[in-house]
Amino acid sequence: VSPGQLYGDVLYFATEARAGWAHSDPHPFYFWGYFVGLNGLWLLVPGLLLLDAARELAMAQRGHDRPRHKSH
């Protein structure tokens, strides 16, 4: 779900930037507080979850790749 959320948010910001920010309120509080700040959370949270998942997968792979000692 996180990659899909990131993709949607990037499209949201990119299309608005391409339109010259025409659909956002020009007041600084609204733009930075609401448009960038609150919508930015939807980039931050999935990004952090993806980083955590990648870290966990890397740890699991390292554990799997360790040579096992045979007991004779």
Image: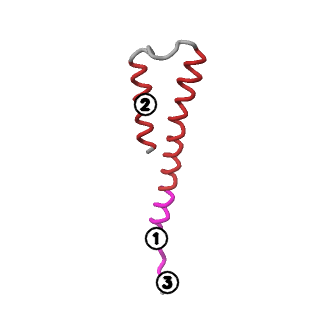
Task: Please provide percent x and percent y for residue 72.
Answer: 48, 87
Which of pointers 2 and 3 indicates the residue nearer the eye? 2
Residue for badge 2: 10
Q: Residue at x 59, y 23 (%)?
A: 33
Q: Which residues are magenta?
A: 58-70
Q: Residue at x 43, y 31 (%)?
A: 10
Mark 1 is on which residue type? Answer: Pro
Alpha carbons under labels 2 and 3: distance apart: 53 Å
Q: Residue at x 52, y 46 (%)?
A: 49
Q: 6 and 54: which one is in front?
A: 6
Task: Please provide percent x and percent y for residue 63.
Answer: 49, 64
**Residue 40: image tag:** none
Task: Please provide percent x and percent y for residue 28.
Answer: 58, 15
- SS of the residue under disc 1: loop
- SS of the residue under disc 3: loop
Residue lying furthest bottom in this view?
72
**Residue 71: image tag:** 3
Alpha carbons under labels 3 and 1: distance apart: 13 Å
Q: Residue at x 53, y 23 (%)?
A: 35
Q: Is residue 18 magenta?
A: no
For the N terminus, which image quadrant? top left
Q: Up-down: is 23 above or below 13?
A: above
- SS of the residue under disc 2: helix
**Residue 67: image tag:** 1
Q: Is residue 62 magenta?
A: yes
Which of pointers 2 and 1 indicates the residue nearer the eye? 2
* Tag 3 near tag 1, CB within 8 Å: no
Mark 3 is on which residue type? Answer: Ser
Residue 9 occupies which quadrant of the picture? Answer: top left
Alpha carbons under labels 2 and 1: distance apart: 42 Å
